[in-house]
Every structure is written in structure tokens, then in C-alpha cells.
């Protein structure tokens, strides 16, 4: 930033802080020729020699705009972004005829790692089904939760893969010594259980690997049971 600010000053630009943009000023033909601002409690009009560039960020901290344009993000856990992302630039641009696009989209992230051990857990939706690989980029995971799972997901880990530090993205909701009791003497493999082949079917041979791998595991587990 020191280099960029020095270059800005060398180019002759004047930087003003503590100035709030209020509205754009337009000529009768629609051309934007300046901006009305509030500086130190005084309203001023700034003339633009060539044009005005709006670079005011998004609107994640404007709750009304979020609820109207991106309702899927309204109930998010904690809006991230600069405090000034109030949608003021978008409002000024649209007020003079600017068109808005893709206002429903937003960057939703769910960083479940680090630690890397958390990837040994599983992320499930409201119907207790996995819906994405846990090692997906956290932006992909957050997007899937926000836009495809109604903003609800749970991370299930064991003692070796649980978070060992405060985590504000996945708050603890339940804890137990085991996931649910096993039914002794009952085993399953292949399509009888939720195996690897799912829609869309992406590779031939999945069923073979599914039945042989889990079939071996089921067979070994059954053979290891103590006879009743």
C-alpha cells in the first residue's frame, strides 16, 4: 500500500478521508458529471472532469438489501466484509439508471479446516446425508450449504478429528460417546447400503469396487463376531 499510495500522490491525485458519497450528479443528457458528498457535516458538490468510478464494495452489511436481493444469505451466521459494505455505490449507480445483475449471489465460505484432521469427519445436511466432499475448497462448501442446503449443515467428527480450539462456524450441538448403537450380528454391503455409486454415475466399475471393498469389510467383521 505504501508503494501504491506513493504512486497515487506522484500522479497528482488528491486523497480525501472522512467523506461520504450521497448521490451522483447528472446532466440533462444523463451523463454523470460529479458527486454530492458529506464532508465534516457539510454537503459539497465535487465536479468530475471525465467520470466517476464507484468502488464501494457490496451490501452484506445492509440487512434490508440482503433480505431483498439475497435472502439465502440473510440468515447466515456472521456477515464477513468491510463495515462500509452497505450497498451505497450500488444504490447511487442504480439511481441514475444503472442496471443491477446477479444481486442474489454472494461469497459464502465455511472453513472447516484447519486442522486437517477435521477432514476425517463428515458434513451432512438436514436429512443426515453427505452432499459434498469434505476436502472441497471452503468456498465451494459454503456455497453448497447456503444455496443448496437451505443454510443448514452439521460436521460430525470423532475425538481425534474434532476442533481443539474455539470454532465460530460450527458450534457444538451434540456430543456423545458413540454415534448410535450397532446391531450385533447384522452386516451389509453393496447397493444394500449407501455405497459409492451415486447420481451422476461418473465411472464404470464403481459397483465392482463398492461390493468387493465393503463386502470384504463386512465379511471380516462378521467372521470376527463371537458366536452366539
Image (spheres, rainbow, N blue to C red):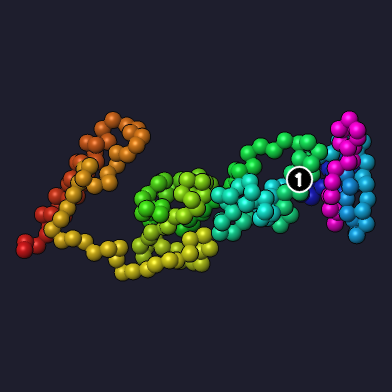
Left or right of residue 109, residue 18 in this image: right
Residue highlighted by disc 1? 91
Q: Is residue 40 above or below residue 50?
A: below
Residue at the left extreme, as displayed: 228
Dot 1 falls on a residue whose secondary structure is: helix
Q: Nearer the viewer, residue 26 or 108?
A: 26
| Left or right of 206 on screen, residue 187 | left
Note whether 19 is above or below 51 in the view shown: below
> At 84% across and 39% down in the image, what residue appears?
52
Q: Is-magenta flag for residue 135?
A: no
Residue 17 appears in the picture as rendered: no
> Magenta-highlighted stretch: main secondary structure?
strand
Where are the magenta residues, as a range?
Answer: 17-34
User: In which quadrant is the C terminus drawn?
Assistant: bottom left
Inspect the magenta stretch and tell me whether residue 30 lies in it: yes
Write the residue at 76% across / 45% down: 91
Say which of 84 and 4 sits in front: 84
40 left or right, relative to 78 = right
- Identify the residue shown where x is 21% and y is 43%: 190
Query: Residue 40, percent across and down?
Result: 90, 59
Residue at 88%, 44% in the rendered image: 35
Where residue 116 appears, as percent x and y from the top left, is 44, 55
Question: Relative to residue 76, is residue 3 depicted above or below?
Answer: above
What number of labels is visible? 1
Percent coordinates x, y for residue 137 in the rendering: 49, 46
Q: Can residue 63 be seen?
A: yes
Q: Is residue 95 left or right of residue 137?
A: right
Q: Is the residue 29 above or below the residue 131 in the image? A: above
Callout 1 environment at 10 Å: few (<14), some (14 to 19), or many (20+)? Answer: some
Amino acid at each position: 500500500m505504501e508503494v501504491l499510495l506513493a504512486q497515487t500522490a506522484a500522479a497528482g491525485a488528491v486523497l480525501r478521508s472522512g467523506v461520504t458519497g450521497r448521490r451522483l450528479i447528472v446532466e440533462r443528457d444523463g451523463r454523470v458529471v460529479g458527486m454530492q458528498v458529506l464532508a465534516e457535516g457539510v454537503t459539497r458538490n465535487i465536479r468530475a472532469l471525465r467520470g466517476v468510478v464507484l468502488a464501494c464494495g457490496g451490501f452484506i452489511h445492509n440487512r434490508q438489501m440482503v433480505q431483498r436481493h439475497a435472502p439465502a444469505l440473510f440468515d447466515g451466521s456472521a456477515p464477513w466484509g468491510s463495515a462500509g459494505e452497505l450497498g451505497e455505490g450500488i444504490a447511487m449507480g442504480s439511481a441514475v439508471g444503472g442496471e443491477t445483475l446477479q444481486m442474489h449471489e454472494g461469497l459464502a465460505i465455511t472453513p472447516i479446516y484447519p486442522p486437517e484432521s477435521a477432514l476425517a469427519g463428515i458434513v451432512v445436511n438436514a436429512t443426515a446425508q453427505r452432499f459434498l466432499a469434505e476436502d472441497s475448497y471452503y468456498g465451494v462448501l459454503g456455497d453448497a450449504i447456503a444455496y443448496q442446503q437451505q443454510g443448514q449443515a452439521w460436521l460430525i467428527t470423532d475425538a481425534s478429528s474434532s476442533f481443539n480450539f474455539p470454532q465460530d462456524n460450527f458450534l457444538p450441538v451434540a456430543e456423545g460417546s458413540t454415534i448410535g448403537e450397532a446391531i450385533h450380528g447384522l452386516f451389509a454391503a453393496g447397493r444394500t447400503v449407501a455405497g459409492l455409486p451415486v447420481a451422476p454415475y461418473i465411472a464404470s466399475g464403481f459397483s465392482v469396487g463398492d461390493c468387493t471393498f465393503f463386502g470384504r469389510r463386512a465379511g471380516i467383521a462378521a467372521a470376527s463376531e463371537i458366536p452366539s
